[in-house]
Amino acid sequence: MNARTQAAPERSGAAPRREAVIDLDAFRHNVRTLSELARPAETMLAVKADAYGHGMVPLARAALEAGASSLAVLDIPAALALREAGITAPVFAWMHDPDALFGEAAEADIDLGISAVWQLDAIAAAGASRAPRVHLKVDTGLSRNGATEEDWPGLVQAALDSERQGVVRVHAAWSHLADASPEDDAVALARLHRAVAVAEDLGARFELLHLAASSAGIRMPEARLGLVRFGIAAYGISPFDDRTGRDLGLRPVMTLRAPVVSVKRVPAGHGISYGLTYRTAAESTLALVPLGYADGIPRIAGGRSEVWINGKRHPIAGRIAMDQFVVDVGDDEVAVGDEVVVFGEGDRGEPTAEEWAGFADTIGDEIVARVGERVSRVYLGESEQER
């Protein structure tokens, strides 16, 4: 298996080694597994937020190679970056401010999520030489973007008027689920169908409907419609509290690691890190690791989290600082340069990102997405096409 390192901006020979190892073969496996589950619905793979911290362009290429038919990003600049990287597959972007680059998006053949009439007006004002495909969004209960039930007919009518003028091509209707409960999601699905019926009465003819992301894509077959926007599940992390990614047949994609940079022996009762909230129970060895909350390690996890060193779990001792944390290894042998795995696949017994979500009272999505820029991304399993 080949590997390539994408260096973080600050890396130099003097900087501590901090690495997020990205297993592209695991990612391809997950995309294939989810795509097979969703069929006959197509798979749109979400690579927003730099592919949940994994690296947008390498993960986008791997997703398409594994069978995804399209890609989703949050905004137009990210979509344009994919085009600049040579990706020609359909790319969907849906969050826009008043200064959004609608003209550039149209020229680059970017699909646009549209939630308000002003966005259609802005596309028209951009005067692009080609009409972009638009996905009209209705708010089905999440209360973020998307037209309200009251505003929906006006949005549909404005889109149809724009289509007749050659400004846009009406392609899809869509929404987001709140994933609050099966009952809430069923209500949201019914609202989408009602909105589509209203739009069709106005003359709209949608080529595509989409609603489900990872959670509903796995557990709510009736919500898969024509396309599922798979996100966190493709990165090997479960969208559920009661099942792990492994339970779903998925493989973790990211391993976060760094070396031990300092070792010291301390007596019983020795205080560690800011506030001295942790004191050693007996004479012990401490290992210093050059990762902190500036690198995405949740500060709240200090005192309740574990890492993997030399075939064994050890507790993080005391508060996690901006650039470092301390591990109490007791009487076990540890040396400067030994590898510390913060989270990984879990096959050897090391913590997973899902476990870290428990340590930090959050979700696995946040654990991987928050890994900072000064952590180098190392890619395993790149194909010749992806290099």
Image (cartoon, grey):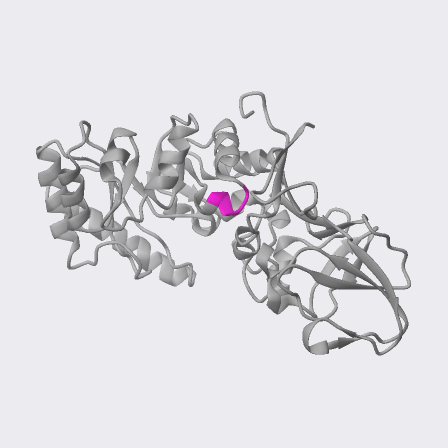
In the image, is residue 210 part of the stretch drawn in magenta? no
Farthest residue to the top: give it: 384
Up-down relation of residue 163 to residue 301 (above or below): above
Question: Is 220 left or right of 363, judged from the image as shown?
Answer: left
Residue range corresponding to the magenta coloring: 50-54
- Which percent across, then down, holds residue 121? 14, 44
Residue at x 84% of width, y 79% of height? 269
Residue at x 77% of width, y 63% of height? 327
In the image, is residue 53 part of the stretch drawn in magenta? yes
Residue sitting nearer the eye, 196 or 77: 77
| Majority secondary structure of magenta residues | helix
- Which percent across, then down, holds residue 137? 25, 49
Image quadrant holding the C terminus, namely: top right
Image quadrant holding the N terminus, namely: top right
Residue at x 74% of width, y 46% of height? 347
Q: Would residue 171 be seen by someone viewing this image from the given angle?
A: no
- Which percent across, then down, holds residue 16? 70, 48
| Quadrant hosting residue 90 | top left
Total numbered circles: 0
Q: Would residue 97 be seen by someone viewing this image from the given angle?
A: yes
Up-down relation of residue 261 to residue 76 (above or below): below
Up-down relation of residue 290 to residue 43 (above or below): below
- Which percent across, then down, holds residue 45? 44, 39
Question: Is 197 left or right of 283, judged from the image as shown?
Answer: left
| Quadrant hosting residue 249 | top right
